[in-house]
Image (cartoon, rainbow, N blue to C red):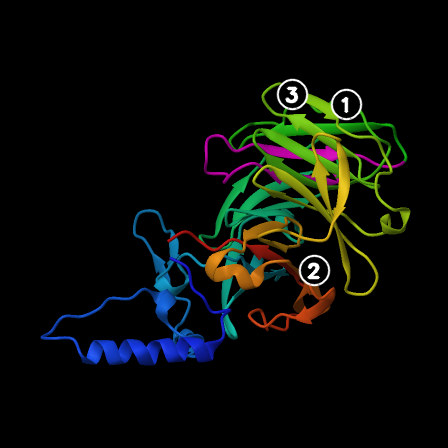
């Protein structure tokens, strides 16, 4: 089930009028059942404004669920703002969610045991979970269920980290990498939730570049470095390889951090160039090189500490060729069609500068 609230509302209104005429002519008490996608945008937003993001705490699992069916399969991530509070004795996590519907938000306030967790920063966001880090300490946090899963202390100060699947899954693997422009060596380490320690940190020959982003795809963690160098770490064989040379993109982009996006086995890197403009490169596996592209195909990208690719076909085709990102205190999107940035209409939330802002996948219902 998908909702088409990107279409022109006047067309939807006309559709509803025709449907009403059809229903009026029905015989007896027969009814025609329609999905939520049949609602026009105006009606959809009116309903949304009247609904609270209601929590339902299950007696056994204490799993928080959103009871509104409208948001059950929304195909885009939510916007989350998170900050820490400390009263001298207890640490508090304050998470504010903004749903992609007109001005709807929800706040959770959670007391967390462990002063050492205060001021930890978000490294990755996947499957509704956050991976946070402070010095050599790292842990998972689910802002919906308020669950914390601590990981062993690391013996390196890593640049980037991510994970393969939900930490409650038995095949979840955490990955950390440390690499800099000042050393030809880099360090990698992995672990799984429940392990007593990270795997022995392995030293590999690196590209002598800082690592800028990491993604996971089909058993491999891919790392992109300043200049576009791409490396791969195969989890099953604990094997590292540098797939490309270095300095593959224009030097003018070196000062901009690369955001890497994985979509159906394809790898993309996105750079911010100039004021509210972006350049996109797609990895050519046959040539092992980055090709500049002017299209995302049937996709939309959401850039953050972990970047998402969202399919933009059919009812969600209006999202195609857009790159959503955080700009100052609000969210915007850059259109590869118009080559301009626009204020985001279904993320109109104006957020503060200080708290962290990330895209997060909605909770499973």
Disc with the residue nearer the chain's start (2 vs 1): 1
Residue 342 is situated, as x and y percent measured from the top left of the image, at: 68, 70
Q: Which residue corresponds to the image point at 50% horizontal and 60% vertical from the top-left?
A: 316
Q: Which residue corresponds to the image point at 71% horizontal and 24% vertical from the top-left?
A: 201
Q: Which residue corresponds to the image point at 61% horizontal and 51% vertical from the top-left?
A: 297
Looking at the rendering, in which quadrant would you find the N terminus?
A: bottom left
Mark pair 3, 1: CA separation: 12 Å
Mark pair 2, 3: CA separation: 38 Å
Instruction: Tell me which segment is drawn in magenta.
Output: 158-181
Q: Which residue is mark 2?
A: 336
Using the image as rendered, state which of residue 28 and residue 357 is in the foreground.
28
Q: Nearer the viewer, mark 2 or mark 3?
A: 2
Q: Can residue 301 be seen at all in this image of the molecule?
A: yes
- 260 falls in the magenta region: no
Disc with the residue nearer the chain's start (2 vs 3): 3
Magenta span dominant secondary structure: loop
How crowded pointer 3 is (Cα within 10 Å; few <14, some 14-19, many 20+) is rated as few
Residue 226 is situated, as x and y percent measured from the top left of the image, at: 83, 41
SS for dot 1? strand
Mark 2 near mark 3, Cβ–Cβ under 8 Å? no
Q: What label does residue 203 carry, if any?
A: 1
Left or right relative to 270: residue 205: right
- Relative to 26, say whether 127 is above or below: above
Left or right relative to 237: residue 76: left
- Relative to 153, say whether 93 is above or below: below
Q: Which residue corresponds to the image point at 62% horizontal and 48% vertical from the top-left?
A: 117
Q: Which residue is mark 3?
A: 238
* Residue that lies at the very extreme toward the left in this rendered image: 28
Left or right relative to 350: residue 36: left
Q: Can residue 354 be seen at all in this image of the molecule?
A: no
């Amino acid at each position: 089930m998908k909702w088409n609230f990107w279409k022109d509302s006047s067309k939807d209104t006309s559709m509803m009028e025709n449907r009403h005429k059809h229903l009026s002519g029905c015989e007896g008490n027969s009814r025609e059942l329609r999905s939520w996608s049949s609602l026009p945008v105006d009606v959809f937003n009116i309903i949304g404004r009247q609904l609270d993001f209601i929590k339902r705490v299950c007696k056994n699992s204490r799993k928080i669920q959103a009871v509104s069916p409208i948001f059950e399969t929304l195909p885009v991530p939510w916007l989350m703002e998170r900050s820490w509070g400390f009263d001298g004795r207890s640490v508090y996590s304050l998470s504010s969610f903004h749903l992609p519907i007109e001005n709807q938000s929800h706040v959770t306030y959670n007391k967390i045991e462990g002063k050492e967790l205060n001021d930890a920063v978000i490294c990755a966001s996947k499957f509704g979970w956050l991976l946070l880090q402070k010095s050599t300490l790292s842990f998972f946090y689910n802002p919906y269920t308020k669950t914390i899963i601590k990981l062993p202390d690391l013996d390196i100060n890593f640049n980037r980290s991510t994970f393969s699947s939900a930490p409650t899954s038995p095949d979840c693997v955490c990955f950390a990498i440390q690499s800099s422009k000042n050393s030809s060596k880099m360090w990698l380490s992995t672990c799984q939730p429940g392990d007593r320690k990270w795997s022995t940190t392995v030293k590999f020959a690196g590209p002598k570049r800082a690592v800028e982003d990491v993604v996971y795809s089909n058993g491999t963690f891919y790392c992109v470095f300043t200049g576009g160098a791409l490396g791969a770490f195969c989890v099953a064989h604990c094997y590292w390889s540098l797939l490309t040379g270095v300095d593959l993109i224009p030097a003018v982009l070196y000062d901009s951090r690369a955001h890497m996006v994985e979509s159906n086995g394809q790898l993309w890197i996105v750079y911010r160039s100039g004021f509210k403009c972006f350049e996109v490169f797609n990895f050519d596996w046959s040539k092992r090189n980055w090709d500049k592209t002017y299209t995302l195909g049937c996709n939309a990208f959401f850039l953050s500490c972990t970047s998402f690719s969202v399919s933009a076909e059919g009812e969600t085709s209006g999202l195609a060729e857009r790159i959503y990102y955080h700009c100052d205190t609000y969210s915007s999107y850059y259109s590869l069609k118009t080559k301009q940035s626009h204020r985001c209409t279904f993320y109109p939330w104006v957020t503060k500068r200080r708290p962290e802002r990330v895209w997060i996948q909605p909770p499973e219902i």
